[in-house]
Amino acid sequence: MNIVVCVKQIPDPASPGALDATTHALKRDGKLILDESDAYGVEMALQLVATAGSGEVYVVSMAPNGETSGMRTALAMGAVKGLLVSDPALAGSDALTTAKVLAAAVNKLGGADLVITGTESSDGYTGTVPEQIAECLGLPSVTFAKKVKIEGSVLKVDRQSESGYDEVECTLPAVISVTAGVVEPRYPSFKGIMDAKKKPLDVVTAGDLAVTPTGWAGAGQKIVNVTQAEARKAGQVIEDDGEAFGKIVAFLENLKLI
Amino acid sequence: MTINNVWVFAQASGGVATTGTLELLTKARSLSSKVTAFVGGDASAIAASLGEYGATKVYATGDLNGKLPGVAISAAMKSIIDSGDAPDVIMFPQNYEGRDTMARLSVKLDRTVLTNNIDIADSADGVVATTPIFGGNILVATAFSGQGPYLVSFRPKSFAAEPAGASSPEVVAVTVPDLGKQGGAKVVAVHTEQSSGPKLDEAAVVVSGGRGLGEAGNYSLIEDLAKLLKGAPGASRAIVDAGWVPYSYQVGQTGKVVKPSVYIAAGISGATQHMVGMKGSKNIIAINKDKEAPIFGIADLGIVGDVHKVLPKLIEALKSRS
């Protein structure tokens, strides 16, 4: 059971996001970290391989400037090998090109029984890459998996739906996207962090994968305007002195809701 | 460019067209005189209502027999496009099925996608879609370039659904092609979570709880308050992820978009993810112990305090009135 987890390395969500003044792209030039929503996929992969009793977990990522710090986090958790695609020509790529690159990276690692992704990244949240990777690889997919197990060559997934969940069965190999909270990601141990520094992490270009990088020119989209939305103003903020509930009652009364 | 032909990814729930579908059809008919509703399933029960909101034609795949919609509907769409009926724009709802179908189709057609939009216009720059970012503080307008069909998805409640008058659109059956290996996933059972009271995305009052509640057991305060106000209980992603309440309670970017008369956020700091789903509320009341919490930046009434103290007193006060 070999599993490839696609991970994204993103600007720290704790710091405010900013757009590049010229390209209007999200600035990603600072230190990048492992997207928290991908930690669930890494953990899921480690658990599935442990249950299967054999196999390995690999991680792939696409990021600018040869950035690997987020991938090292995944390696510290227990993945054994990483493949990073980093290429200035990929700057400005859309979700479709990203999916083509990640699918090619999965193939470069020799394919996988299962490819795991998050449902959407925390910074760009286009949310189409998992299903696009599956289509590029010609595989079935189950998105929004909240419970996953493998019985023989059959994948059994509880898939989140608008009104509850669906039980889905799927042949392997396949692609799944997992929701946050599906498992509890482990914290890397000190030993894991030290070991991760020695684990193989190859860096390749789009050309190495025979993907034609399109970047800005081929994205099929162009930002034409960026404006401030009409801001919602803050109202009255008061410290609770034990009686603040009365303010809420008065507010609701004023709206004739009570 | 001139838009001559728009498709809308149409969905039904409980035998009626979803509100989201009617919203998209309403917008579609303002863009083009030719509007086609593409139904992944049987359309006989909903065709009239699709027509009433603007569809001049309906494609329907018939029962998908447990196939996952994304792979099946995208293959059906591709076959129609290949046969010569290629739309300029395909509008999708920003939900599970819409997103999956759009993603599969983008690879089949080798076309980009624009997601999470709240508006679309045919302008001098071409077909331009608008998406809010950074919690809705900034609006980014993006034009498609190159060849269509342009694939674009919209958040719920981006447009108001308005009927155009009765009409009977032509309904055309579409065969889902053989999906091969990609059709390897099947739905074997469906589970529906029951809830009482008004629906979260339709309620006039929504009371949502977050991590500040401390533990799952305290969520009953949210339910009690929602019930007293004849509203619906909601939740932040943090406590849904933590397993305190089901996903169907989630308000935010990856959950429901709500626009009630009053939104009460209790123990919710106001992550972008959450604010995107509720900042359209008419009135917002926030209770949080951290006075720096971003939620206070958009609240009409902010109480800096402990939800464990404020909520029980509020509940008592409301009970004593009824």
Image (cartoon, coloured by chain):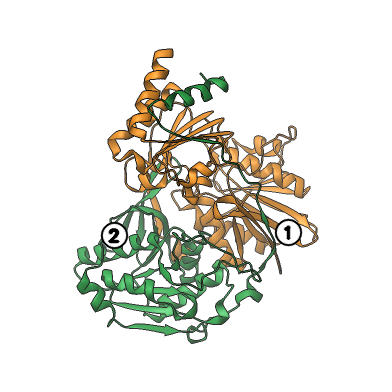
Chain colours: A green, B orange
Does B79 sit left or right of B6 as displayed? left
**Residue B186 appears at what percent x and percent y?**
40, 53
Q: Residues within 10 Å of mark 2 (few under 14, many from 20)?
A: some
Name the kind of residue labelled 2 in the image. Pro
Q: Nearer the viewer, residue B289 or B142?
A: B289
Disc assigned to residue A185: 2
Where's the N terminus of chain A, which quadrant?
bottom left
* Image coords of residue A77 (percent x, y): 27, 68
The disc at residue B45 is: none
Where is B273 relative to A90, above or below?
above
> Looking at numbered disc 1 in the image, what kind of residue is underneath it?
Val
Q: Residue at x 47, y 45 (%)?
A: B255
Q: Say if mark 2 contacts mark 1, CB within 8 Å.
A: no
Residue that numbered label 1 is attached to:
B127
Asked if residue B144 can be seen in this view, the reply is yes
- Tag 1, which secondary structure? strand
Residue under mark 1: which chain is it in? Answer: B
Element marked by disc 2? loop
Residue at left offset 29%, top offset 80%: A197
Closer to the camera in the image, A60 or A100 = A60
Crowding at dot 1, Cα within 10 Å, few <14 / some 14-19 / many 20+, comes out as many
Query: Of discs 2 and 1, which sits in the foreground?
Result: 2
Q: From the viewer's perspective, tell me whether residue A14 is left or right of residue B43.
A: left
Do badges 2 and 1 share one subunit? Answer: no
Q: Quadrant of residue A202?
A: bottom left
Q: What distance separates the C-alpha of mark 2 from that of mark 1?
A: 42 Å
Q: Nearer the viewer, residue B132 or A95?
A: B132
Q: Residue B185 appears at what percent x and percent y?
A: 40, 57
